[in-house]
Image: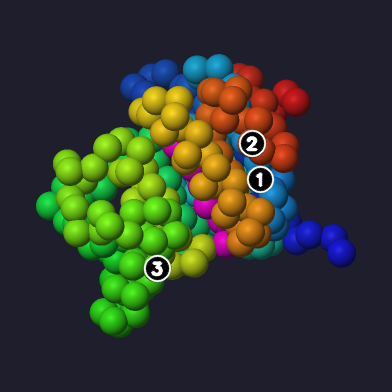
Amino acid sequence: MARETLIQLNEVWKIYEIGNVKVEALRGLDIEVKQGEFVAIMGPSGSGKSTAVNMVGCLDIPTRGEVLLKGRNIARMSESHLAQIRGKMIGFIFQTFNLIGTLSAKENVMLPMVFQNVPYPKREQQAIRLLNQVGLGERMEHRPSELSGGQQQRVAIARALANEPEVILADEPTGNLDSKASMIIMDLLKALHEKEKKTLVVVTHDKQVAKYAERIIMLKDGKAVA
């Protein structure tokens, strides 16, 4: 059975105006991600990876071209509608973890569910389940400062899964980790793809990380070249 296209970028341009200078971050980028795929986006510095991530994650809209999520063009949506989609459809994992230092691991995982009006008992139950899933059942009351970098990234993965999104978007998820912690994180992501059929989009400069993906999209000068 053919897999549904979840994300599609058609001839996407993104032009930033800095004073009198125009910077073309994306120059007619075409990307398609199907349901259940594990895709890696690679490219040198300045290739447009970060801007492409922002488009895929509905964090920005194109100057021209289409960004389609399940066939709907996000360029025509309001910011409040985009925020709803980000909260429900896409789970984000960042290089810098972005955990809230004053909250415990469990509270960090519960936080995205607050914005979706999930009742407290269900939020807590889901957070406990996810932290056990990523191997941190004994650390759920610890704050980020009491966890290693690898453990913080596992909390971030659990948080990304909190609202059961269809797509996990990971931007340099191993960029701040040593090789051992990186392998643990990538094995976790691969398991999410294989066992839970999650759609994964990973942006990385690391060839070892990209090897985990089914398909690699190479960017250069704001375009997909391979």
The residue that appears at 61% across and 61% down in the rendered structure is: 196
Pointer 3: what residue? Answer: 129
Location of residue 44 (image quadrant):
top right
Instruction: Classify 202 as above or below 207.
Output: below
- How far is the residue under mark 1 from the one under mark 3? 24 Å
The residue that appears at 62% across and 30% down in the rendered structure is: 210
The magenta segment is: 166-174
Is 38 left, or right, of 186 in this rendering? right
Is 129 left, or right, of 170 in this rendering? left
The residue that appears at 87% across and 64% down in the rendered structure is: 1
Pointer 2: what residue? Answer: 212
Instruction: Classify 14 as above or below 191.
Output: above
Q: Which quadrant of the figure contains the C terminus?
A: top right
Q: Position of residue 177 (x, y in %)?
A: 38, 29
Is residue 184 among the parts visible in the rendering?
yes
Instruction: Classify 114 as above or below 23.
Output: below
**Callout 2–callout 1 Cβ contact below 8 Å:** yes
Instruction: Classify 83 as above or below 92.
Output: below
- Label 1: how many residues lie within 10 Å, few (<14), some (14-19) or many (20+)? many
Answer whether residue 168 is magenta in the image: yes
Answer whether residue 137 is magenta in the image: no
Q: Position of residue 106 (x, y in %)?
A: 26, 62
SS under mark 3? helix
Pointer 1: what residue? Answer: 38
The residue that appears at 17% across and 50% down in the rendered structure is: 143
